Image (cartoon, helix red, strand yellow):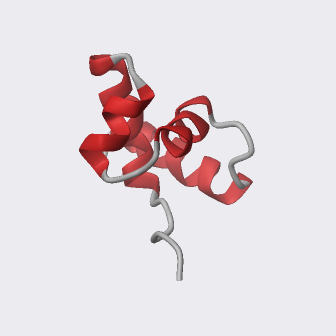
Amino acid sequence: MGAPRVTPQEVIKMQQLYRELGNYAAVGRKLGRSGSTVAKYVKMQGVPQALRIAVENLMQKGEV
C-alpha cells in the first residue's frame, strides 16, 4: 500500500510552506512527502480536477 492520498488541506499547506521555505524538498521533509510530490501539488500540474476544485473552494472560503 502506498502513501495516503493528498488532501485539499494538505495541498494548501504545501503551497503556504513553499512560499515560506522556497524549496520543494524542505516542504516535503516537513510534511512527510517527497519533494516531487510537493512540486506536483504546488505547481498543480497533473492534479485531478476534483482536487483542484476542492482546493479552490477552500481558498475562496478562507477555511485554511
Judging depth in this view, the residue of 29 and 46 nearest the camera is: 29
Q: Position of residue 51 (x, y in %)?
A: 60, 55
Image point 39% across, 38% down: which residue? 14
Q: Position of residue 13 (x, y in %)?
A: 33, 41
Image point 48% across, 60% down: which residue? 6
Query: Tag count in the figure?
Result: 0
Judging depth in this view, the residue of 1 and 10 nearest the camera is: 1
Image point 61% across, 29% down: which residue? 43
Q: Position of residue 58 (x, y in %)?
A: 43, 47
Q: Is residue 51 above or below residue 16?
A: below
Q: Is residue 20 above or below residue 33?
A: above
| Residue 13 placement, left or right of 7 | left
Image point 37% across, 41% down: which residue? 28
Judging depth in this view, the residue of 5 and 3 nearest the camera is: 3
Residue 44 occupies quadrant? top right
Q: Position of residue 49 (x, y in %)?
A: 72, 53
Q: Quadrant of the C terminus?
A: top left
| Residue 16 placement, left or right of 2 | left
Residue 12 occupies quadrant? top left
